[in-house]
């Protein structure tokens, strides 16, 4: 999968990846609501601005482990008061409208790519990438079908998170 992203960056389909930079990729479901802590991937993931934030937090407090058992479509269905299959198909962050795909088996993932550096021009690799003294600057994201390697979306993002100056965890 990563080889495909690198190959496509060489072909300039993933234009925000540069040969002279070091990157770290965060692999996650495309609808992971907290991705705004890593990069500003769009207003849909500004959970703190959404009208359903209080309802979701209340649900997590009253049913602390239920969100781990439910597919994302159940959350969307509850927020939009619709059938989970309808919610999944019409509120998919990637716009995938395939009735055969179930959220629990969804092959699409988002890879949020951040530039990693220590302020020096030297390459950063291995465990150093996760070091505490590293700068992590959002670069972009790639939505990819993990079964076929097809890149659905690739987009450069702002150099800040959706939370702007709120510190985010390194790991």
Image (cartoon, helix red, strand yellow):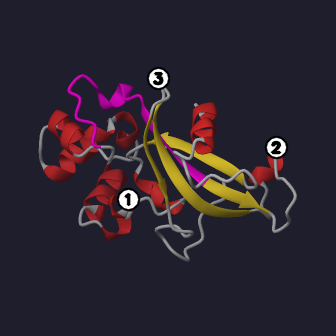
Q: Earlier in the sequence, mark 2 or mark 3?
A: 2
Per the rendering, the mark at residue 45 is 1
Going by the picture, which residue comes out furthest to the bottom? 165
Q: Earlier in the sequence, mark 3 or mark 1?
A: 1
- Which segment is the magenta one? 95-113
Between the residue at mark 1 and the residue at mark 2, the CA separation in whole angstroms equals 30 Å
| Mark 2 in CB contact with mark 3 (< 8 angstroms) | no
Q: Is residue 19 above or below residue 86?
A: below
9 with respect to 154 (left or right) = right
Front residue of 37 and 13: 13
Residue 20 in the magenta stretch? The answer is: no
- Answer yes or no: do the residues labelled 1 and 2 have beta carbons within 8 Å? no
Judged from the image, the secondary structure of the residue bearing numbered disc 2 is helix
Q: Earlier in the sequence, mark 1 or mark 2?
A: 1
Q: Label 3: which residue?
A: 147
Image quadrant of residue 3?
top right
Mark 1 secondary-structure assignment: helix
């Amino acid at each position: 999968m990563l080889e495909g992203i690198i190959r496509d960056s060489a072909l300039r389909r993933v234009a925000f990846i540069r040969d002279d930079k070091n990157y770290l990729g965060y692999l996650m479901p495309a609808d992971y609501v907290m991705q705004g802590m890593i990069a500003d991937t769009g207003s849909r993931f500004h959970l703190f601005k959404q009208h359903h934030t209080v309802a979701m937090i209340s649900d997590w407090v009253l049913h602390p482990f239920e969100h781990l058992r439910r597919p994302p479509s159940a959350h969307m269905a509850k927020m939009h008061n619709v059938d989970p299959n309808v919610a999944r198909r019409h509120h998919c962050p990637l716009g995938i409208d395939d009735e055969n795909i179930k959220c629990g088996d969804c092959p699409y993932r988002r890879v949020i790519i951040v530039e990693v550096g220590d302020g020096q021009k030297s390459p950063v690799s291995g465990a150093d990438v996760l070091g505490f003294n590293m700068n992590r600057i959002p670069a972009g994201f790639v939505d990819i079908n993990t079964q076929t390697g097809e890149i659905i979306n690739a987009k450069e993002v702002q150099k800040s998170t959706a939370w702007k100056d709120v510190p985010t965890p390194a790991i």
